[in-house]
Image (cartoon, rainbow, N blue to C red):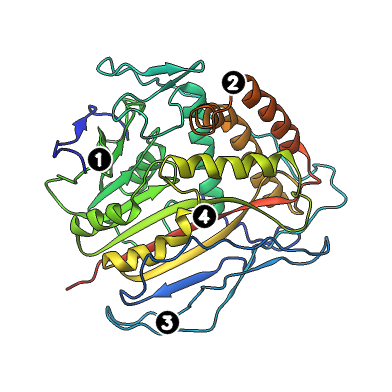
């Protein structure tokens, strides 16, 4: 870690989930694979798992085999019970008579209160602004368009998961949201839980000033040494595979700064795109996704990090670790109103982030020039709108408990 500096306060500043595994007609269904471990077994060794792309007929229900999936019943802090491997059902079916009738208009949220901390001057590059605290640690911009995209991404997560937290928490006293971004999760959690004290931390001071009285924000990096004065009952982070290099260290820091019986929950994309058939193969979208994973890996981070959260939490000492997987369509290709809405929102999420994530990474990590990146972005944008490409992301929620003793 870096030097032992206390977090920098930003002031009194502020800082979904319906299961994606609905049935073919959009009804709620299975489609979520759970994995529970009750003892600190396993470890971080070995390569990142990579789910295989299936080859199926259009109307089949698609299952992705989870080869390293060991279900077990919840037991004591030190017991671990193995079970046969399970399958992850996406619950997505191709809509071959698509007329977009199941998709309502999606409006991006607009910022009503801008972040105006005069203490920090943001770095400008490629026509965007980026954080200056620990400059370069996070490769997404932090300007207003990106803030609106982050709020859209929050809406996607809320629809996908059905609620703000999947861990079985009960009125936690002290809560921290790592990488809080615009602070929208922390604000909503504080509103829903008025007896909780909620702290959101981020590298950028982009949170609104007017927030619930039980919510506040600080500039901090979760990979630095934690110097908080009181332990937490619930540690939350979402979509941080582009922010953290050393997740095991973050999990250890969380463990050391939690009350016995407290819960940790990390939610993230498995960034490698999946497809229910061969329609992604050979597309500009597939090429971009592969290049993105390569560029991210050259920064010392991994777009596949979520696949190892479970074993890394266990290694840090957490117990009763549960891994849940959700299928998030990349555009409005699946059947069912719910899936079409999620797909439309995710398509907008990717398109709004294409320039911000691609330009810096591809020029600095892959040696591309700006014109080459712009040309690829244009091709990828066309593919994203093409509902003949039946791609989706696996989104994971992994949570565990600190033992009582």
The x and y percentages for residue 350 are 61, 37
Quick check: marks 2 and 3 in contact, CB under 8 Å? Answer: no
- What secondary structure is found at the residue carrying circle 2? helix
Q: Which mark is residue 73?
A: 3
Residue for badge 4: 161
Mark 3 vs 1, N-terminal side: 3
Mark whose residue sits in front, 2 or 3: 2
Residue under the image location 85 percent in, 43 percent down: 99
Q: For the residues marked 1 and 4, what is the alpha-carbon distance in whole angstroms?
A: 24 Å
Q: Which mark is residue 214?
A: 1
- What secondary structure is found at the residue carrying circle 4? helix
Answer few, some or many: residues within 10 Å of disc 4's Cα (few below 14, many 20 plus, some between 14 and 19).
Answer: many
Spot the residue most to the front.
367
Quick check: marks 3 and 4 in contact, CB under 8 Å? Answer: no
Answer few, some or many: residues within 10 Å of disc 1's Cα (few below 14, many 20 plus, some between 14 and 19).
Answer: many
Residue for badge 2: 370
Quarter the C terminus occupies: bottom left
Mark 1 vs 4, N-terminal side: 4
Q: For the residues marked 2 and 3, what is the alpha-carbon distance in whole angstroms?
A: 52 Å
Mark 2 vs 3, N-terminal side: 3
Q: For the residues marked 4 and 2, what is the alpha-carbon distance in whole angstroms?
A: 37 Å
Mark whose residue sits in front, 3 or 1: 3
Spot the residue most to the right.
97
Is 149 positioned to the left or the right of 248 in the image? Answer: right
Quick check: marks 3 and 1 in contact, CB under 8 Å? Answer: no
Mark 4 vs 2, N-terminal side: 4
Mark 1 vs 2, N-terminal side: 1
Q: For the residues marked 1 and 2, what is the alpha-carbon distance in whole angstroms?
A: 44 Å
């Amino acid at each position: 870690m870096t030097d032992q500096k206390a977090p920098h306060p930003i002031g009194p500043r502020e800082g979904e989930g319906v299961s994606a595994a609905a049935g073919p007609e959009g009804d709620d269904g299975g489609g979520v694979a759970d994995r529970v471990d009750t003892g600190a077994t396993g470890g971080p060794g070995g390569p990142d798992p990579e789910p295989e792309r299936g080859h199926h007929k259009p109307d089949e229900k698609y299952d992705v085999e989870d080869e390293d999936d060991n279900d077990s019943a919840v037991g004591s802090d030190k017991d671990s019970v193995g079970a046969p491997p399970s399958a992850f059902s996406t619950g997505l079916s191709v809509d071959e008579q698509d007329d977009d009738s199941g998709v309502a208009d999606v409006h991006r949220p607009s910022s009503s209160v801008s972040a105006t901390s005069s203490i920090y001057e943001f770095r400008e590059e490629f026509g965007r602004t980026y954080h200056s605290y620990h400059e370069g640690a996070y490769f997404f911009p932090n300007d207003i368009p990106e803030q609106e995209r982050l709020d859209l991404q929050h809406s996607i997560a809320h629809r996908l998961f059905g609620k703000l937290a999947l861990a079985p928490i009960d009125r936690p006293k002290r809560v921290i949201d790592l990488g809080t971004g615009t602070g929208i999760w922390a604000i909503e959690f504080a509103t829903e839980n008025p007896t909780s004290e909620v702290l959101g931390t981020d590298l950028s001071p982009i949170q609104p000033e007017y927030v619930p009285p039980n919510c506040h924000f600080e500039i901090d990096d979760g990979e630095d040494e934690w110097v908080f004065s009181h332990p937490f009952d619930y540690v939350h982070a979402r979509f941080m595979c582009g922010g953290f290099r050393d997740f095991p260290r973050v999990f250890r820091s969380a463990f050391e700064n939690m009350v016995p019986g407290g819960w940790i929950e990390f939610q993230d994309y498995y960034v490698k795109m999946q497809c229910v058939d061969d329609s992604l193969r050979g597309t500009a979208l597939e090429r971009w996704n592969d290049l993105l994973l390569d560029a991210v890996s050259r920064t010392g981070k991994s777009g596949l990090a979520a696949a190892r959260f479970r074993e890394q939490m266990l290694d840090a000492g957490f117990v009763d670790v549960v891994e849940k997987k959700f299928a998030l369509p990349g555009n409005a290709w699946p059947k069912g109103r719910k899936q079409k809405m999620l797909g439309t929102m995710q398509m907008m999420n990717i398109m709004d982030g294409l320039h911000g994530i691609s330009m810096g990474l591809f020029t600095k990590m892959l040696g591309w020039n700006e014109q080459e990146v712009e040309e690829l972005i244009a091709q990828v944008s066309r593919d994203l709108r093409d509902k003949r490409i039946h791609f989706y992301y696996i989104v994971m929620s992994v949570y565990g408990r600190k033992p009582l003793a």
